[in-house]
Amino acid sequence: MRNLIWMVLACMAPWAMAQSYFGPGETKAVQGSGAKFADALLNMSADQLQCSLHQNRLPADATPSFLAAQKASIQYPKGDKFMGDWQKGGAIFNNLQKANCFSCHFGSPANLGGDVGPSLEKYGLQRGQSEAVQRYTYEVIYNAWSYFPCTVMYRFGVQGLLTPEEIADVVAYLLNPASDFNTKPALGGKR
């Protein structure tokens, strides 16, 4: 019941709570950072607000309903085809203005990777290409919170950063055994 009350309150006034989350000085600084950035922070969605208020550690009793809501937000590509064109996916994965995956994940043969997220080196060779692996990979990219509540990973689909088809292309880049992601050594890795 406590969970239900929290969700109702969060849905009724997320903007008011988000506004009160920041002090006047912080609000002014955020507003000076650009309209899109300010909108994302000052007009938080109910789920983002819940993560912020709980400092990214949801209470155990809130987690199941949170995960279910995140899973329900996922939109799938046409025909539920989880793997698209791996070459297009490589261009998206390795583009600073698009997905920028390599900044947080090690494994790219084109760019030196980061270490904020887990290594994805030879992702497809290690996991295979079963439908379950394709679906899982797609869902994590579309909305990482559907598996990892409040993680710092972008929610590419939910936030409108990538289309379902672009996400399917990235899935193909990660999983297709012919992809240079799986055939070439990761930049900065062992050869």
Image: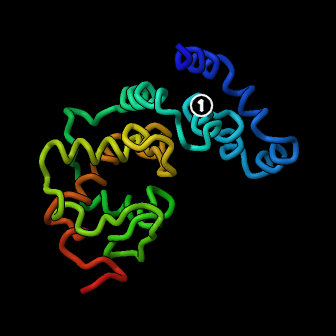
Please, is residue 146 above or below residue 98 in the view? above
Q: Residues within 10 Å of mark 1 (few under 14, many from 20)?
A: some
The residue that appears at 28% across and 36% down in the rendered structure is 77
The residue that appears at 37% across and 83% down in the rendered structure is 188
On screen, residue 29 versus residue 5, left or right, reads: right
Q: In terms of secondary structure, where does tag 1 sit? A: loop
From the viewer's side, name the closer residue of 131 and 55: 55
In this picture the colour scheme is rainbow
Q: Quadrant of residue 179?
A: bottom left
Measured as percent of width and height from the top left, residue 13 is found at 69, 20
Measured as percent of width and height from the top left, residue 87 is found at 26, 62
Residue beneath disc 1: 45
On screen, residue 154 versus residue 175, left or right, reads: right
Mark 1: which amino acid? Ser
On screen, residue 57 versus residue 191, left or right, reads: right
Q: Quadrant of residue 144?
A: top left
Please, is residue 26 above or below residue 72 in the view? below
From the viewer's side, name the closer residue of 182 and 51: 51
The residue that appears at 14% across and 52% down in the rendered structure is 129
From the viewer's side, name the closer residue of 130 and 80: 130
Considering every residue shown, the one lying at the far bottom of the view is 191
Measured as percent of width and height from the top left, residue 2 is found at 56, 17
